[in-house]
């Protein structure tokens, strides 16, 4: 009763051992967090472009760092870089 094909009951199989967070997992996660903070400190943010539905036009689009939560409200494009040998 309630079994699918090949005796499948739809339940996940039991693990042989308990699923635990090991010391290596904790160290790895700590490393990822510290790396993210360090990148934000040296201004290498992970910007996500979002849109505010309450505002219209160019002001509706803003950027938010996925790691530290800093918001970038700069709406003007950056100045172009000088390229050696480029241009007429």
Image: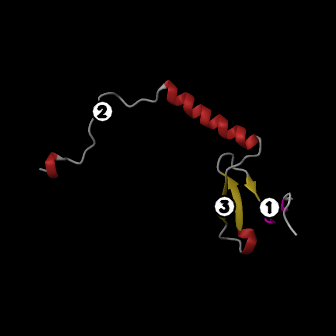
Question: Is residue 78 covered in magenta?
Answer: yes
| Label 1 neighbour load within 10 Å: few <14, some 14-19, many 20+ | few
Image colouring: secondary structure
The residue lying toward the viewer, choosing from 3 and 85, is 85
- If you read the primary sequence from the N terminus, does the residue marked by circle 3 or circle 2 appear first? 2
Mark 2, residue position: 15
Element carrying mark 2: loop
Q: Quadrant of residue 42?
A: top right
Magenta residue span:
74-81
Q: Which mark is residue 55?
A: none
Give the residue at x 71% y 71%: 55
Q: Which mark is residue 74?
A: 1
The vertical placement of 34 against 48, above or below, is: above
State if disc 1 and disc 3 touch (CB < 8 Å). no
Measured Cα–Cα span from mark 3 to mark 2: 41 Å
Give the residue at x 47% y 26%: 22
Mark 3, residue position: 49
Question: Is residue 61 covered in magenta?
Answer: no
Q: Is residue 15 left or right of residue 55?
A: left
| Label 2 neighbour load within 10 Å: few <14, some 14-19, many 20+ | few
Q: Position of residue 4 (x, y in %)?
A: 16, 52
Give the residue at x 74% y 71%: 58
Measured Cα–Cα span from mark 3 to mark 1: 12 Å
């Amino acid at each position: 009763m309630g079994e699918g094909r090949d005796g499948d009951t739809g339940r996940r199989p039991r693990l042989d051992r308990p699923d635990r967070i090991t010391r290596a997992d904790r160290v790895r996660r700590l490393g990822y967090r510290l790396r993210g903070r360090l990148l934000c400190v040296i201004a290498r943010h992970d910007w996500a472009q979002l849109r505010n539905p309450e505002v219209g036009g160019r002001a509706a689009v803003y950027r938010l760092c996925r790691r530290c939560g800093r918001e970038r409200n700069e709406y003007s494009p950056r100045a172009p870089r000088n390229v050696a040998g480029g241009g007429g």
